[in-house]
Amino acid sequence: MKRRTLDVLFSVGGLVLAGLLLVLAVVMTSNANFSKNYVKDQLSQQQITFKTAATLTDEEKKSACLVKYAGQQLTTGKQAECYANDFIGLHVQSTAAGRTYSTQGDYLTGLKAQLAAAQKAAPPDTAKIADLNTQITAGTTARETLFKGETLRGLLLTSFGFSVFGVKGGQAATVAFLFAGLLALLSLAGLVHAFKTTEDETFAAPQPARAAGVDPSLASV
């Protein structure tokens, strides 16, 4: 095959591939921008603001991100992760002695069983009944708080996860842009080389056939 033809084929193929990578990069950039803007718009509508540095408790000050974002409005995925894990998560753990919304339900069921047993006792233990009723009321309030806190925490972490896809998309777009540019440059260099090559130059041309009955190594003897 002629060297010029081979150079043209590889160069054209490289340009086509560079074009496909460019299209992919544009699409990924568009998706990344959509993710970033969508997360920002949705979080901004919640109107959540981090506590100021002066109002943070000693436990909250142990969180580097709560200190970093102190006083700021929550608008980004990273901020949502911080607020969900280091603020809501911290207070949810202290709401019901570390119990979750689900396990708090089991805890209340146990208290109600104890209350039913105390009411059936003869004579009824009025002091125990009053104490159990107080615990059930407090436990029910705590379970409602857990439900609200865990729901908001889950929504914020979902927003954070969505924002991560946008970040990864932006990184993929950058890599695609770089490879597209590199391929385009190499392909253009190949085309320049092709037109600088003489038309009769071949690639990996076969060696000339030996003369019949003559060993080239003996030709000078």
Image: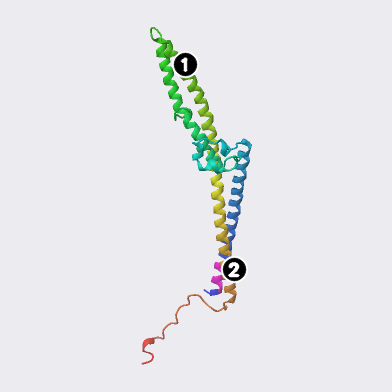
Quadrant for the C terminus in the image:
bottom left
Looking at the picture, how far across and down is residue 15, in whole percent?
58, 63
- Up the image or down, 202 lies above or below 90; here it is below
Which residue in the protein does label 1 denote?
A: 133
The residue lying furthest to the top in this view is: 123
**Left or right, residue 204 beside residue 173:** left
Q: Amino acid at mark 2?
A: Leu
> Magenta stretch?
4-11
* Badge 2 or badge 1: first in the primary sequence: 1
Looking at the picture, how far across and down is residue 107, in whole percent?
43, 23
Which residue in the protein does label 2 denote?
A: 188
Q: Residue at x 53, y 32 (%)?
A: 151
Q: Main secondary structure of the magenta part?
A: helix
Looking at the picture, how far across and down is residue 63, in whole percent?
50, 40
Q: Residue at x 56, y 39 (%)?
A: 53
The residue mark sitting in front, 2 or 1, is 1
Q: Give the class, few, some or many, for how many residues have Cα within 10 Å of label 1's Cα (few <14, many ≥20).
A: some
Q: Residue at x 60, y 46 (%)?
A: 36
Q: Amino acid at mark 1?
A: Asn
**16 or 112, which lies in front?**
112
Q: CA distance from mark 2 to mark 1?
A: 82 Å
**195 or 35, which lies in front?**
35
Looking at the picture, how far across and down is residue 217, in whole percent?
37, 87
Q: How many marks?
A: 2
